[in-house]
Structures are given as structure tokens and as C-alpha cells.
Amino acid sequence: MHYTTNGEAAVDKTQVGLVFAKEPPQWQQRGGSAMDFRFKIPAGAPAHEVRASRVLAADTIITSLTPHMHMRGKDMTYVAKYPDGRVETLLSVPKYDFNWQITYQLKEAKRFPKGTEIEVIAHFDNSPQNKFNPDATKDVTWGDQTWEEMMIGFWGTVVERQK
């Protein structure tokens, strides 16, 4: 959760629900991500590209994909580059909207072999034509606030529980 102060007291209605299983689960939820902390989006740029990737250190089962950017986020694509040279687009979000951050659950979990590279490609619109852009006259870098930017491609995974 990101909270930005606005000078007024507010009430947070966030809730967390826990369900305790009677038996230990066979699978455990985990996750991973590819992100770039060092990008700089030039002032006025309408489609600045930022890439990040991660090579899977073990066979991995991916269950979901969650793109994350802020107000200048334009689009994001996830690509798998397999050790045998095959390339597969896993997700393309051509019109990213900060107000509708969605976790995309795969219809079926997908197994990736060790050595697969998951690459995330994002574009940012830092131009005056982006009606959500807080200030098109400034270069933008990584930051927690919505007037700054983030570039994170999250994914959910499951692993078999160690007994």
C-alpha cells in the first residue's frame, strides 16, 4: 500500500483475512520480480522504454503477472526467453492505467525451466499529452510517490512444500 499525505486526517479501511488450514498445504505461494531502480525518464518523452529481466535460478511455476508503474505508465509486456532459444510473450498490457492495477491470473499455471529469462519491457509517457502526468517539464526517476515512477514486473509462483 502506498499512502500519500494530503494534510487531512483520514481513516484507513484496509482489512486482512486469514484462514488457517487444518493440514499443512502441499504448495506454498511465492513470487518474483524484474525491476529497474536506475531509470531516468526525460522530460517530455512520449514513449520512453525501460527494460528489466531476471533469470530463473530453478524450475519455476508461474501463476500470475502483476505490472506496476505510476501515472506515466503507458504499457508493459512480459516475455519469456527459454534456454533453448524460444521466445514467448506471456502478457501484453497495451494501455496501462494506474487506477486499474490488475493481477493477471494465468488460466493454467505455467512451468518454466531453470535458466529461463523473464524480461519486462515498459514504456512511459512523460509528455504534456498524458493528462495524468503531474509535470511533463521534469525528468522522472524511481520513487514511492505517485508523482515519481516505478517499473516492476511482479509474478506469483508456487513451490512444492518441503516436508
Image (tube, rainbow, N blue to C red):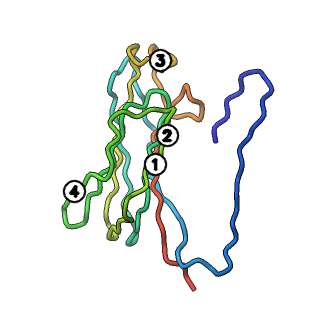
Mark 4 or 3, nearer chain start: 4
Q: CA distance from mark 4 to mark 3?
A: 36 Å
Position of 28 relative to 53 (above/below): below
Q: Position of residue 52 (x, y in %)?
A: 38, 46
Mark 3 or 2, nearer chain start: 2
4 or 3: mark nearer the eye: 4
Mark 4 or 1, nearer chain start: 1
Q: CA distance from mark 3 to mark 1?
A: 27 Å
Position of 106 relative to 103 (above/below): below
4 or 2: mark nearer the eye: 2
Mark 4 touches mark 2? (CB < 8 Å): no
Mark 1 or 2, nearer chain start: 1
| Amino acid at dot 2 | Gln
The residue wearing badge 2 is 101
Position of 35 relative to 70 (above/below): below
The residue wearing badge 1 is 66
| Amino acid at dot 1 | Thr
Residue occupying image coordinates x 74% and y 40%: 13
Q: Position of residue 153 (x, y in %)?
A: 43, 47
Residue occupying image coordinates x 38% and y 24%: 125
The residue wearing badge 4 is 87
Residue occupying image coordinates x 38% and y 29%: 124
